Image (cartoon, helix red, strand yellow):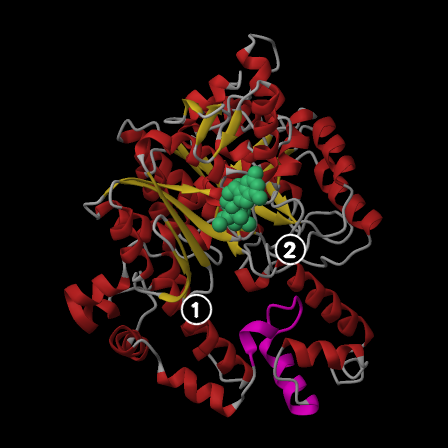
Amino acid sequence: MKNQEIANIFYEIADFLEMERVAFRPQAYKKAALTLEAMEKDVADVYKEGGRAALENIPGVGKGISERIEEYLRTGKIKYLEQLKKKTPVNIEEMIKVEGLGPKKVKVLFEKLGVRNLNDLEKAARAHKVAPLFGFGEKTEKNILEGIEFLKRSKGRFLLGEILPMVSEIKEKLEKLTEVERVDYCGSIRRMKETIGDVDFLVISKNPEKVMDFFVSLPGVVKVWGKGKTKASVRVKDGYDMDIRVVPERVYGSAFQYFTGSKEHNIVTRKIAIDKGLKLSEYGLFRGSRTVVGKTEEEIYKALGMVCPPPEIRENQGEIEAALRQAQGKPNGLPKLVELDDVKGDLHTHSDWNGGKNSIEEMAKAAQNMGYEYIGIADHTKFLRIEKGLNEKQLEQRNKEIEKLNSRFQIQNSRFRILKGCEANIMNDGSIDIKDEALAKLDYVIAGVHSNFKMEKDKMTERMMRAMKSPHVDVISHPTGRLIKKRDEYQIDMEKIFRVAKETGTILEINAHPERLDLNDQNVRRAKDLGVKMIINTDSHHKDQLRFMKFGVAQARRGWAEKEDIINTQPLEKLLRCFKN
Ligand code: DGT
Ligand code: CA
Ligand code: CA
């Protein structure tokens, strides 16, 4: 699927154009990139079926942009980008990853200091050459160095939400191969970890060599790290590595257990085996040289005196003890983790009343197609100008629109409902950017921090606590503000936040956007233990993004959350009772 590749190029073009201070066109490229990213259908298929005309039917794609898409699909590159790069030879993608650094600042750094990449930038900042530049200053220089440190820490890992759509195509290709009986993800992908180091596949086949040949010659493979009779390892052009392992059916369970990991989990399971006089490896569970079991994971765990724990929690964080207890019929066994099917609606979605792409009606239809009972529209409020946040009056008008649509559902005898919400802004002092009277008219209120992320810990904690104490604020969106691989969490005392959430009955969000996944797994676990209620929302700005729900559910599962911990697993009546007054 070429959608993401082309979207990435468009983002880069937009950045270059922004750097050159070109008006409007950067926005056009970004818009097209967003659409391509969210599109379910492969743009190559769209083109194949209907040519340029079909491309131009994609929202946000006009004549110029469809030409670029065609060029990429035909030649694998876009000359325009190469010209832009030649004109200003900087690694813009790399540099704007530094929090607080945009294309315009990158241009200044290039022109005044000759900075072309992250390395140059770090040197210049360390030599204190950045602070004196107009528009920069001491604080920016410090932030740049902190930002570079952060990037170094997250290097070499990829977002699950980016990797999964790309590798699911490869998985499908493997599945279609006649020699292949079964394919599974292993490693961190199977455990649905928020970031992935490399992709691991496990295959059952009687003809491993055929599978190896196929694997190393997949389109997109740029390097073969190794190729044996039953294992291979490659790098693909998007920069990540993939491992494959082929085993016969009779040892599949042990290989599956071993390669799913985590390493920490495996170390303990292997030790349990040793204590029982057994030996556990990827080839089976042995007593001496005799295989005890090996075909399924369940058999392996059972032989170890355990119940098979769900992959998401195999991190040696207490799941082994719980699995042992459960098998012995003792209390405090494994949690019954929340499932995607339990989710009855999504309450953090944006419509075209603010910065979103789709109308309320389109969002509602998409939610119905997901099998939901309700959707909540949580448009931004007025402080957030870039997202076209709504003021009191506009919010009122939007409410009317929702009521109109709801009465239509009633006429059709449909139980589906659209809820009136908003995502308000928590100001520096913890107040909310829109009047209480306006909030009182809504079914629920989400509030979040969208500005001044760099406050001192005490102040940020106070800010958030004051918001939670508001009788109108029901949910706190993306509570720690992190963007994976982009921006650290803000300084905040989560223990205090959990306590006040519990006291005030404020619900904390697990934001399902692949870049946020905020609360993270550890915070979910802590919130659950303290009895704080949570909600899983996608923060969709486009109807196709409702599909991010699965990543939020995975994060909730990694944090041991059960159905009762998550309020949007409840039917409408019960859900509404979770909100303050
Ligand atoms: P990643 O790739 O960094 O996101 O994380 P994983 O968990 O996918 O790690 P990876 O790809 O290095 O290895 C896949 C699985 O293989 C891992 O989860 C457990 C198993 N494994 C790898 N190396 C070791 C090891 O040294 N000891 C044990 N016990 N298991 C290992
Ligand atoms: Ca891996
Ligand atoms: Ca691996």
The type of residue carrying mark 1 is Asn
| Main SS category, magenta section | helix
User: Of the residues tagged 1 and 2, which is closer to the observer?
Assistant: 1
**Residue 265 included in the magenta stretch of the image:** no
Q: Quarter holding the N terminus?
A: bottom left
User: Which residue ends up furthest to the left in the rendered image?
Assistant: 49
Residue under circle 2?
450
Q: Which residue is found at the position 76% from the left and 31% from the top?
A: 499
The type of residue carrying mark 2 is His
Q: Position of residue 270 (x, y in %)?
A: 57, 29
Q: Which region of the structure is painted magenta?
A: 91-113
Q: Label 1 CB, ligand 1: below 8 Å?
A: no
**Residue 101 included in the magenta stretch of the image:** yes
Q: Is residue 157 visible?
A: yes
Q: Is residue 50 left or right of residue 320?
A: left
Q: Are marks 1 and 2 in contact (CB under 8 Å)?
A: no
